[in-house]
Amino acid sequence: MNSVNKTLYIPLYGKAYVSHKGIILSDKKAEEIWQKEQFPIKGKSKSKWLAYYMGIRACAFDTWLKEQMARFPDAVVLHIGCGMDSRAERVGANGHLWYDVDFPDVIKERKRYFAETEQYRMLPGDARTPEWIHLLPKGKNALIVMEGISMYLQTDVLLQLMQACNGHFAHVSLLMDCYTSFAAKISKYKNPINDVGVTTVYGMDAPALLENGTGFSFVKEHSMTPEYCIGQLKGLEKRIFRRIFAGSFSRKMYRLYEYQNIPS
């Protein structure tokens, strides 16, 4: 895998770590994959604090998606940049047609651990060139999650991807996490993704930037570290995490944005 693809090991480790501890997420598939593969991450990438952060971030996405799936029972679920995430198993398709999308070599790796069904599909595709979207059912409602991917895409590429989604689906609800410009600037010096060879990332400070010609409107900012997740940590760890990783400095680095399009 190339360096960007290798970043999938970091959230996989985090989800396996918290699941093994019995907090935040129940993700036996992540535990199984990590135990078998033991991917080579090191340094900050194996920090317990980052593991907690990755688990909590995943939980925030899962919670949002469950709520949206209840609101839109006929919607297609699209997880762009799925990596080795087992969100489809954690959340459950529940009658929805679900597509996990990532680079071909990532999908090849996924197929060692995940099996397609009538409701669940894995699709090789590059977010930077979204021609693959035409392989999905057209004109349906869609729920799209983009976790840990926007920071590897320049703004014009994100705009192109959102335009493609808007043109292909009817109503779309989209949740994505984004680096701020400050986070992107300092990432070359101190970021766990450096441990797997990634040094170039992108950030933005105004969520309205992604409204430009995409057909989407910014809905609201969500908490990346909801209290119902932090509350599962214990004692001093809870206090340290809340103060350092969920405070104002965290928000200076990292945001979680919801968008929806305006159906024609």
Image (cartoon, rainbow, N blue to C red):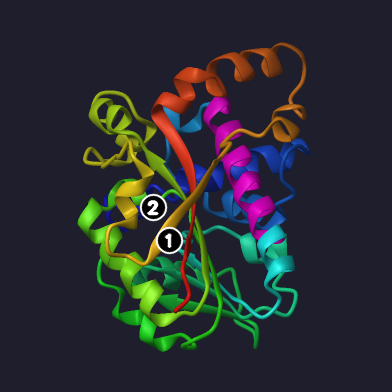
Mark 2 residue element = loop
Mark 1 residue element = loop
Q: Which residues are magenta?
A: 48-66
- Residue at (54% x, 84% y) in the render: 140
Q: Which mark is residue 81?
A: 1
Find residue 165 and report its image quarter: bottom left
Q: Is residue 182 left or right of residue 139?
A: left
Q: Mainly helix, strand or loop, the magenta region? A: helix
Q: Label 2 sits on what residue type?
A: Ile
Residue 126 appears in the figure: no
- Residue at (61% x, 60% y) in the render: 86
| Badge 1 or badge 2: first in the primary sequence | 1
Q: Which mark is residue 149?
A: 2
Asked whether residue 103 is drawn in magenta, I would say: no
Find residue 23 and report its image quarter: top right
Residue 155 appears at what percent x and percent y? Answer: 24, 52
Count up the numbered dots.
2
- Front residue (pair 216, 81): 216
Q: Label 1 sits on what residue type?
A: Gly
Q: CA distance from mark 1 to mark 2?
A: 6 Å
- Front residue (pair 95, 108): 95
Q: Is residue 91 left or right of residue 37?
A: right
- Front residue (pair 159, 150): 159
From this view, report whether residue 52 is shown above or below residue 100: above
Question: Mark 1 near mark 2, Cβ–Cβ under 8 Å?
Answer: yes
| Dot 2 alpha-carbon crowd within 10 angstroms: few under 14, some 14 to 19, many 20 or more | many
Q: Is residue 128 left or right of residue 81?
A: left
Residue 237 appears at what percent x and percent y? Answer: 68, 17
Residue furthest to the front in view is 264
Residue 59 appears at what percent x and percent y? Answer: 65, 46
